Image (cartoon, rainbow, N blue to C red):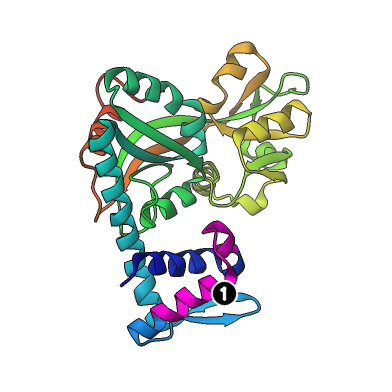
Amino acid sequence: MNLDYLKTFYTTVKENSISKTAKLLHMSQPGVSFQLQTLEKELGFQLLIRSNKGVVLTEAGKIVYDYAVSLLSIQKDIDRELNSLRTNIQETIVSSCTTVGSYTLPCSLYLFKRRYPNTKVILNTCNSDTVVENLVNKSCHIGIVEGKPNGIKIEYTKLASCDLCLVCSKNICKYRTVSVDELTELPLIIREKGSGSRQSLEYELQKLAISLQQMNTVLELTSSEAIKAAIFNGQGYAILPELSIKHELDSGSLKKIAIEDTEFKTDYFLAYTKESPPRGSEKTFYDFIQSSRRGFCS
């Protein structure tokens, strides 16, 4: 089986488009179609149903796609490890939730690089659901998520806990404390679906018998930085991980508001797939980030 053809098939499914696949792989559209047809002919099964809306996997296609993910991941690992031998630089890919990736890991990576100069860590940040997808799709080796990962394929280890703080701009903040009833009336800015911060907020609200739908949500944004910008513009209040607002609390630009008789918390977890436990430089980073020397700069 030609791995290049398998990669073309995998990319077509992932992009749901032959034209996008052709562009990504620097091929012509007829070239993509030829490789897909050749792969189907070799395997003796139709793998894709093509339409104007994209492509749909057949039952045989689903089987081949699952193995394609694994085979292409193995090919990447072979290339990566051979390159490590060639350059004497080992590489680890980490996918992190936005909060940790933006506010904590840069410090951790600096400390790690000082201690292990021959290890290169590539960090990408996204929401927690996407981190889990990246792990399952084998596009990263280690994940860091907010809230416990979903899915039976994932192993996780608790890394740290953090307060979720109700905050507002110093210019409009008129409360020191609010009741739970008052909390539901505040114009609230929240993270998008798939975000660990949002999932943690929903979980904490459920303890108070409140759903997110009962809150007065005025905006959904895709990062803590975007939420903070909206708060500074007087557009509302937010409940954010303390990790993401330490600087603003210290400077006084954001004010923390207590919620009567309750505290909101969130947890962060190291994660990996059961079939691909950390090894080599991945294990070194995994152990470092949870070490007693606090590779995790909380």
Q: Is residue 17 visible?
A: no
Who's the residue at 69% across and 40% down the image? Answer: 188
Whether residue 29 appears in magenta in the rendering, the answer is: yes
Query: Looking at this view, is 201 or 110 the one in front?
Result: 110
Q: Where residue 277 sits in the image (x, y, percent)?
A: 23, 48
Above or below — where is 24 with respect to 232?
Answer: below
The residue depicted at 37 percent of the width and 40 percent of the height is 93
Which amino acid lies under the numbered mark 1 shown in the image of this protein? Answer: Pro
On the image, which quarter does residue 84 sit in? top left
- Residue lying at 32% horizontally and 23% vertically, measured from the top left: 112
Image position, residue 293 (x, y; %): 27, 18
| Most common SS among magenta residues | helix
Q: Secondary structure at mark 1?
A: helix
Q: Which residue in the protein does label 1 denote?
A: 30
* Percent coordinates x, y for residue 274 in the rendering: 25, 54
- The N terminus - image quarter: bottom left
Q: Which residues are magenta?
A: 20-39
- Image position of 292 with respect to 84: above or below: above
Residue at the spot 51% in from the left edge and 30% down from the top edge: 102
Is-magenta flag for residue 3? no
Q: Is residue 88 left or right of residue 180?
A: left
Compared to residue 193, the image places residue 284 above or below, namely above
> Can I make out residue 255 in this image?
yes
